[in-house]
Image (tube, rainbow, N blue to C red):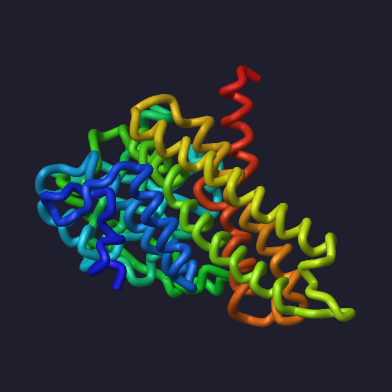
Amino acid sequence: DAGRLGLTGLCLPRDVGGGGLGALDTALCLEAFGRGCADTGLAFAVAAHLLACAVPVRDFGSRKARDELLAALAAGELIAANAMTEDGAGSDVSAMLTTARRSGSGFVLDGEKSWASNAPVADVVVTYAVTDPEAGFLGVSAFALPSGLPGVRLGAPLPKLGLAGCLAGRVRFEDCPVPEEYLLGDEGQGSAVFQHSMAWERACLFAIYLGMMRRQLRLVVEHASHRRQFGRRIGDFQGVSHKIVEMRRRLESAQLLLYRACWLLDEARNHVAASALSKIAVSEAAVANSTDAVQILGASGYLSGGVGDQLRDSIPSTLFSGTSEIQRELIAKDLGL
């Protein structure tokens, strides 16, 4: 149970039952989780719950929201979903159509989110809505609300290619009344809240893929050491051994970039480009290494389970938390281009 192991509260405060860890130590724990857990989808679900949902409650939640939600999120007693993406607003978050209008002492939400990890089983939904259409970046607000509020509709699990252990679905808000205490930060601060949560997610979440790749590399080396063809171990053929060396190079290069991004986040230094570099390196290494692992294992690598599942679980890593193309735009901007 991830909650009993403390994984659902790694970087949450100790006074609510969390581990009180910084970004780097959180990443190291998630890396170990990814290495030891055969279900990468489960590890992803836990990381998304913690980094995209519990972290903004930790840092922007009202006292009442923190008292109501944070300890249960840390213990894994409440499951959180991050509902940001819409059908027409993925990388272009400025195209968001979900609205939150003032009503009495709170807000009324209307709209639909199209891709929310953990949504079908969520007890808490962290979501974003336009509160001032004329204000652009400053016209979006963030909320952490119980899924049991009137007007919240959680959709069925989407039939995904991979990450089966993390159920994802749509979330609809229909005249949903949201009390003021579930607002994260101030009204109009939603874009900043989202960027903050993404900083933690981009820096730390991808450590689960480092763990997966470490487990994968061990499996491939073992296979290449024992599988024989033409009277020799296949690891004796340069076509195989050099491919495995390249898998290690990708893994360890990505690992160092991720550790640096987390350290910069812990030190409150500029981490945007470092996190983008890390995110690209880890996600693209996971896809490339998984493809190589399937090739080396041959027919057995194409079976469900093992490296076949790892390949399916790796493919979406270049999409979520900002596509590889968006990360390259952030890096180009950092270079002054």
Residue found 49% across the figure and 67% down from its top: 40
Q: Position of residue 195 (x, y in %)?
A: 40, 37
Q: Position of residue 31 (x, y in %)?
A: 44, 56
Residue found 31% across the figure and 66% down from its top: 122
Q: Position of residue 207 (x, y in %)?
A: 47, 52
For the residue pair 204 and 252, the one nearer the viewer reads as 252
Assign the C terminus to one quadrant of the image. top right
Q: In the rendered view, does 61 fall on the left or right side of 206?
A: left
Q: Is residue 186 visible?
A: yes
Q: In the rendered view, does 8 fall on the left or right side of 197?
A: left
Q: Is residue 59 above or below residue 9?
A: above
Residue found 62% across the figure and 56% down from its top: 286
Q: Position of residue 80 (x, y in %)?
A: 31, 60
For the residue pair 327 and 298, the one nearer the viewer reads as 298
Question: Total of numbered circles in the picture?
Answer: 0
Residue found 64% across the figure and 72% down from its top: 222
Q: Is residue 161 visible?
A: no
Q: Is residue 337 above or below residue 247?
A: above
Q: Is residue 294 above or below residue 49?
A: below
Assign the N terminus to one quadrant of the image. bottom left
Residue 176 position by quadrant: bottom left
Q: Residue furthest top?
A: 336
For the residue pair 48 and 11, the one nearer the viewer reads as 11
For the residue pair 242 and 41, the one nearer the viewer reads as 242
Q: In the rendered view, does 302 fall on the left or right side of 173?
A: right
